[in-house]
């Protein structure tokens, strides 16, 4: 059954400002805010409170959509195309940004601290929140741990929590819940119509990223000593229709002959930095953005790719989790197209 996207977006906008919803948030923050402290340390007791909060928001929105007769599954399928369409409701971007603030732990923590201050002062307002993130681990030890994590994720099966969500014969996509985040881990196994070394040359060259990925408006190297040393620090700007630009400030590393001779592993991750975000952008964090590429033994003109991703684009988790598999498929197809235009069309290789 088709969903009237204009009406659905308008209704979600209304739901998020309903008095009953605001009262539920006020009651929740008033009950739990005293636990939070203004320090960089995130205590273990914060996690179950944040999970309760995320569940409260998601259940409220889901219930109201069901009451309205909105088919949530169909809404999610139609949303990506609708966002790109000229008929999109003018509040679509604002609605997604507002939903984002409910899905960020740091925004949640800021809100709880503001509620605690207001409670001490005798007030009861819930503050507006900017989205900020704590940085991930970095350095040589993190690279080692990241490579080991990649090995475990690649080998994991249904018993480890992985479930198959899409199978297009040439690419299979799996998803796994992360107890530490509302954003799922996504993994794909794909057969790619290009040699393994060419895949890596295109995928890991920041200087040509905008030539093959139309979703990236700019990509520049701003630090690092090169792939033979500590990798590169790369800044990318991505434009998502109707909402603010996304900035990726990540370290890229290319590990050759790993996890076995002839294979390549691309490692992409966020790390601590004092570089401020660019104006009017939202900085994306990457818990993992790795890719293992192996030559096909029976056909060196092809390669077998395992790709992993868990990235916070500042979108509500139910949107991020729904679209993550599509993102991987698009990425592989764009890389194949780039190979054809950069190498085959030029007659450089086969």
Image (cartoon, rainbow, N blue to C red):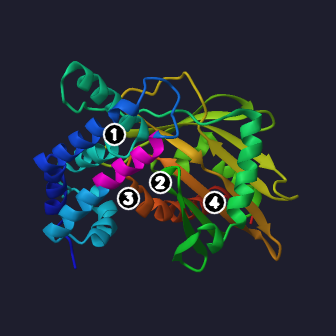
Which residue is at 71% across, 39% downward? Answer: 142
Q: Which residues are magenta?
A: 46-57
| Residue pointed to by mark 1 | 244
Which residue is at 65% across, 52% downward? Answer: 290
Residue projecting furthest to the top = 121
Which residue is nearer to you in this view: 95 or 152? 152
Number of residues whose C-alpha sits closer than 10 Å to that of mark 4, classed few (under 14), some (14–19) or many (20 or more) = many
Where disc 3 sits, the SS reads helix
Report the Cα–Cα distance between label 3 and label 1.
19 Å
| Residue pointed to by mark 2 | 183
Report the Cα–Cα distance between label 4 and label 3.
21 Å
| Residue pointed to by mark 3 | 318
Query: Residue 297's spot in the image, x, y percent?
Result: 83, 73
Query: Residue 300's spot in the image, x, y percent?
Result: 80, 69
Do the CB atoms of the residues marked 2 and 3 lie less than 8 Å apart? Answer: no
| Residue pointed to by mark 4 | 307
Number of residues whose C-alpha sits closer than 10 Å to that of mark 1, classed few (under 14), some (14–19) or many (20 or more) = some
Which residue is at 54% across, 78% downward? Answer: 168
270 w.r.t. 348: above or below: above
Residue 17 visible within the image? yes
Compared across the picture, whether 329 is left or right of 24 comes to right
Label 4 or label 3, whichever lies nearer to me, is: 3
Where disc 1 sits, the SS reads loop
First in residue order: circle 2 vs circle 3:
2
């Amino acid at each position: 059954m088709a969903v009237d996207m204009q009406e659905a977006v308008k209704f979600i906008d209304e739901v998020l400002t309903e008095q009953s919803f605001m009262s539920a948030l006020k009651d929740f923050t008033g009950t739990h805010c005293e636990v939070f402290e203004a320090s960089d340390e995130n205590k273990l007791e914060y996690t179950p409170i944040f999970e309760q909060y995320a569940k409260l928001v998601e259940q409220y929105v889901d219930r109201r959509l069901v009451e309205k007769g909105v088919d949530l599954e169909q809404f999610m399928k139609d949303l990506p195309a609708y966002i790109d369409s000229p008929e999109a409701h003018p509040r679509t971007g604002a609605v997604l940004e507002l939903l984002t603030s409910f899905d960020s732990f740091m925004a949640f923590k800021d809100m709880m601290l503001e509620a605690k201050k207001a409670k001490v002062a005798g007030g009861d307002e819930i503050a507006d929140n900017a989205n900020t993130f704590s940085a991930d681990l970095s350095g040589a030890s993190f690279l080692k741990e990241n490579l080991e994590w990649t090995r475990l994720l690649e080998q994991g099966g249904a018993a480890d929590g992985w479930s198959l969500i899409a199978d297009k014969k040439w690419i299979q996509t799996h998803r796994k819940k992360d107890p530490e985040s509302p954003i799922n881990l996504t993994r794909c196994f794909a057969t790619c119509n290009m040699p393994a070394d060419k895949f890596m040359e295109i995928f890991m060259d920041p200087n040509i990223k905008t030539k093959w990925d139309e979703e990236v408006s700019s990509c520049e190297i701003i630090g690092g000593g090169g792939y033979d040393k500590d990798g590169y620090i790369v800044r990318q700007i991505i434009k998502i229709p109707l909402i603010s630009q996304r900035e990726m400030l990540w370290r890229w590393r290319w590990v050759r002959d790993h996890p076995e001779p002839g294979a390549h592993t691309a490692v992409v991750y966020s790390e601590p930095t004092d570089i401020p975000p660019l104006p009017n952008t939202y900085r994306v964090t990457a818990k993992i953005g790795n890719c293992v590429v192996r030559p096909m033994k029976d056909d060196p003109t092809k390669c077998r790719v395992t790709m992993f991703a868990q990235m916070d684009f500042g979108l509500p988790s139910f949107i991020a989790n729904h679209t993550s598999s599509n993102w991987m498929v698009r990425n592989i197809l764009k890389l194949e197209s780039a190979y054809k235009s950069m190498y085959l069309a030029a007659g450089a290789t086969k």
